Image (cartoon, rainbow, N blue to C red):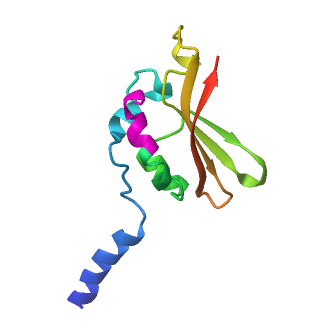
Amino acid sequence: MRLYTLLLLVIIPACSGAGKELPGLDEKAWKRDKNGCLNERAEMIEPLRAALGEIKGMSENQLLQVLGQPDHNELYTRNQKFYIYYLTPSLECGTTGQETQLFLEIRFSATKMAREVMIKESGR
């Protein structure tokens, strides 16, 4: 009976999918920097670029645990959705002088798995 209990304690957390981390990404700073206004996300662009492959294939729940709520989300046809996280200050920050914004765009499939992960640039 003890062996059975021990196995359950080991197997259940391993199957939960929780605990996914992205190397070089400070999750607390990322979540605190809403819309990129504090420029903390801008300091994490290179580690983020290195982790794009790890983000692809993550579930929506895993991603929300790691990156928090997106700055914007968009619904698309066939239950697809896009999450957008600003890496540099967005227009909502009220800053002037920055002509372009960098943002992380994640496209989820209808099964809530990240299918496309890209860092994009937009102009004002």
Q: Residue furthest right?
A: 77
Residue range (magenta): 41-49
Secondary structure that dominates the magenta span: helix
Q: Residue furthest left?
A: 2
Where does the N terminus fall, quadrant-wise?
bottom left
On the rendered structure, is 41 left or right of 118?
left
Residue in view at x 37 percent, y 27 percent: 40
Task: Give the percent coordinates (x, y) of residue 58.
Answer: 51, 57
Residue in view at x 36 percent, y 74 percent: 12
Where does the C terminus fall, quadrant-wise?
top right
Q: Is residue 114 visible?
A: yes
Q: In this rendering, is residue 75 above or below 108?
A: above
Task: Give the percent coordinates (x, y) of residue 95.
Answer: 51, 11
Task: Give the percent coordinates (x, y) of residue 55.
Answer: 49, 52
Residue in view at x 50 percent, y 26 percent: 35
Q: In this rendering, is residue 17 above or below 91?
A: below
Task: Give the percent coordinates (x, y) of residue 119.
Answer: 55, 38
